[in-house]
Amino acid sequence: MFGLPLFALLVLGPALTSASDAGSMVKARAGQRTEELVRACLVVSFASASLILLLQTALVSGLSGADLGENSLSSVLSSDFGLWSGARIPLVLGLAVLLVGRVRGVLTKETSTAWWGSWIVLSGGLLVATSLSGHASVAAPPWSVLNDVLHLASGSTWFAGVVGLGVVLPHAVASTGSISLAAAAVSRFATVALVSISLAATTGTINSFLALERFDDLWRDGYGRTLLAKIVVFMVVLGLGGLSHFVIRNRLERAAADAESGRDARRLFQVAIALEVLVGVAILVLTGLLTGLDPPGN
């Protein structure tokens, strides 16, 4: 939810404007698929936020021997974890009111700066609530939450861009085979990805130092081993990012005027994006596992 408006503003919108063969139908298809993606994100976000509260309420109920009801839920909401986990629900509902039915046309007409800003602020609130309900909120340095929010923001910007290139862009160009649009989008995303991945790597390294007591915790502790697996998968992201930045982007740009090489370049692009989406999902799974594990010493 946070990365999607940045992808639309920094990558897809400018690419649609600069691509000579991106007509109104292509823009309409891009808006339609973006709308579908936003709806899916809202449903998953609401369901996951609700499930977190339900599971925590069931845990409190089981530990206290009380009924699964209002008292158990009140106990959860009275904690910092419950407060910030519960804050995600009104934020998601606010995003639904702002976005549903309106995203479809943002790529074909002018949209106010206030609208884009509201989307970024509300979705950024989801990142802050996530950090304040996680490990970063109990870390010793007072700036650990800010570092974690930056880590989430940079990671979501990269992943939303990868999903956008893999889901929105192919749907938009399916009827025209707009190679110039694909080249423009990949070229613009290469810069966004370079900045977001670099920031994610820096803030992630800081998070690791805050979470681990000793270097050998990376293989002696369950949290450390999961973190090590995430680092290894992130190395794959760097490799795929380098492939997109130095190889695929150049091939798409050269293929804009050559239909035969354009088909080969598109196939390579589709394979690389599919791999990046799979690797991104693996990172999300490992991150989810980390949130359920206590760092060494906790």
Image: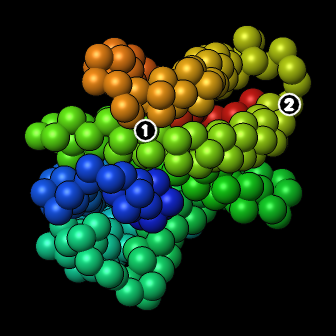
Amino acid type indicated by mark 2: Glu
182 over 221 or under it: above or below: below
> For mark 2, what is the residue?
213
Query: Is residue 267 visible in this depiction of the protein?
Result: no
Q: Secondary structure at mark 2?
A: loop
Mark 1, other Cα within 10 Å: few <14 / some 14–19 / many ≥20: many
What residue is shown at x 48% (from left), y 23% (from top)?
Answer: 251
Displayed quadrant of residue 162: top left
Q: Is residue 80 left or right of residue 265?
A: right
> For mark 1, what is the residue?
183
101 over 115 or under it: above or below: above
Q: Nearer the viewer, mark 1 or mark 2?
A: 1
**Coordinates of residue 210 in the picture (x, y in percent):** 81, 42
82 over 91 or under it: above or below: above
Q: Residue 229 has which mark?
A: none
**Coordinates of residue 57 in the picture (x, y in percent):** 34, 56
